[in-house]
């Protein structure tokens, strides 16, 4: 019997998915996905994430995009009030992409607040680190962060070792099928530090397509090929990793 799969990060509140949520969830189940973590981005979206988690297999995490930080204090408050209903804080982090005009020092200050909140509430942290992987990892280590999931890490594979040494996890999206950078990351990071994510509706294995949680099976297949281990082993280990860090029982 094949192991179930866990999608540790996606956005089911996105209109492209929410409009057909029942069908999306049914397709995920058919692909072997038993648990989906949906992440809210900003106060209103976090409220929607809490709502869609009425589905038995959906668990919410609450966060905010690093480049859209207006009202982040309300998100911090919402996390505290719903700490027992959520499985993680995030996504939160840093975004130093050339297209982002947000103040980097503000990003760092707010990120530190979320790290500190994760420690005080003893909740895992799902980290966004576009074009800022090394800096995000350094901040996490400096702040003593624990139970960290580096979501769709786009940094150098060599920098990932900072995370591995601190027992952080790296969640691999279906875009690994077409991304040399993600393939190098999988090659570098031990299986014991790997999780699966869809990041639906983004990071599809086919550019331009709407991504879905069911596609984490593609992530698992590519990890299996790169690591040279049976697919069943990848499914088993990544699921055990996810259940442990998110503290979810089957």
Image (cartoon, rainbow, N blue to C red):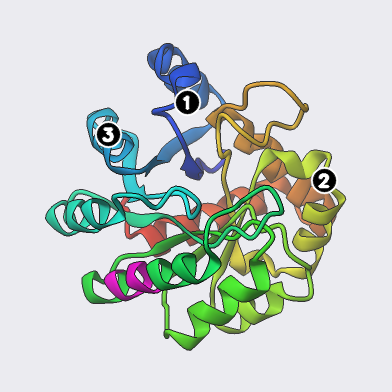
- What are the residue bounds of the magenta stretch? 112-117
Judge left or right: residue 232 versus residue 113: right
Judge left or right: residue 165 versus residue 244: right
Q: At 71% from the left edge and 57% from the top edge, which residue is drawn?
A: 154
> Is residue 99 in sight in this rendering?
yes
Residue 56 is covered by the magenta coloring: no
- Label 1 Cα neighbours within 10 Å, binned few <14 / some 14-19 / many ≥20: some
For the view shown, which residue lies furthest in the left direction? 81
Secondary structure at numbered mark 3: loop
Q: How many labels, in total? A: 3
The residue mark sitting in front, 1 or 3, is 3
Place of residue 2 in the rendered image (x, y in percent of width and height, measured from the top left): 57, 39
Reply above or below: 44 against 16: below
Secondary structure at numbered mark 2: loop
Place of residue 29 in the rendered image (x, y in percent of width and height, measured from the top left): 47, 26
Judge left or right: residue 204 versus residue 71: right
Tag 3 residue: 53
Asked whether the beta carbons under mark 3 and mark 2 sit within 8 Å of each other, the answer is: no
Q: Mark 1 or mark 3, which has the lower sequence index?
A: 1
The residue mark sitting in front, 1 or 2, is 2
Quadrant hosting residue 120: bottom left
Q: CA distance from mark 1 to mark 2?
A: 26 Å
Secondary structure at numbered mark 1: helix
Place of residue 52 in the rendered image (x, y in percent of width and height, measured from the top left): 29, 28
Tag 2 residue: 179
Asked whether the beta carbons under mark 1 and mark 3 sit within 8 Å of each other, the answer is: no
Reply above or below: 41 against 93: above
- Label 3 Cα neighbours within 10 Å, binned few <14 / some 14-19 / many ≥20: some
Tag 1 residue: 29
């Amino acid at each position: 019997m094949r192991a179930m799969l866990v999608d540790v990060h996606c956005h089911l509140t996105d209109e492209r998915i929410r409009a057909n949520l029942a069908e999306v969830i049914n397709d995920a189940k058919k692909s072997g996905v038993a648990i989906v973590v949906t992440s809210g981005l900003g106060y209103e979206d976090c409220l929607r994430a809490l709502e869609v988690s009425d589905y038995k297999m959906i668990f919410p995490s609450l966060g905010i995009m690093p480049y859209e930080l207006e009202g982040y204090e309300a998100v911090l408050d919402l996390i505290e009030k719903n700490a027992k209903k959520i499985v993680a804080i995030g996504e939160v982090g840093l975004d130093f992409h050339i297209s982002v005009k947000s103040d980097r020092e503000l990003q760092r200050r707010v990120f530190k607040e979320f790290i500190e909140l994760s420690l005080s509430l003893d909740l895992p942290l799902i980290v966004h680190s576009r074009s800022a992987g090394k800096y995000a990892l350094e901040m996490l280590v400096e702040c003593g962060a624990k139970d960290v999931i580096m979501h769709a890490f786009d940094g150098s594979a060599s920098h990932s070792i900072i995370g591995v040494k601190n027992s952080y996890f790296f969640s691999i999206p279906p875009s690994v099928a077409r991304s040399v950078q993600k393939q190098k990351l999988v090659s570098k990071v031990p299986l014991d530090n790997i999780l699966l994510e869809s990041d639906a509706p983004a990071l599809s294995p086919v550019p331009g397509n709407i991504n879905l949680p069911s596609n984490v099976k593609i992530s698992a297949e590519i990890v299996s090929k790169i690591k040279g281990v049976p697919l069943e082993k990848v499914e088993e280990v990544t699921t055990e990793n996810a259940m442990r860090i998110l503290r979810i029982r089957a």
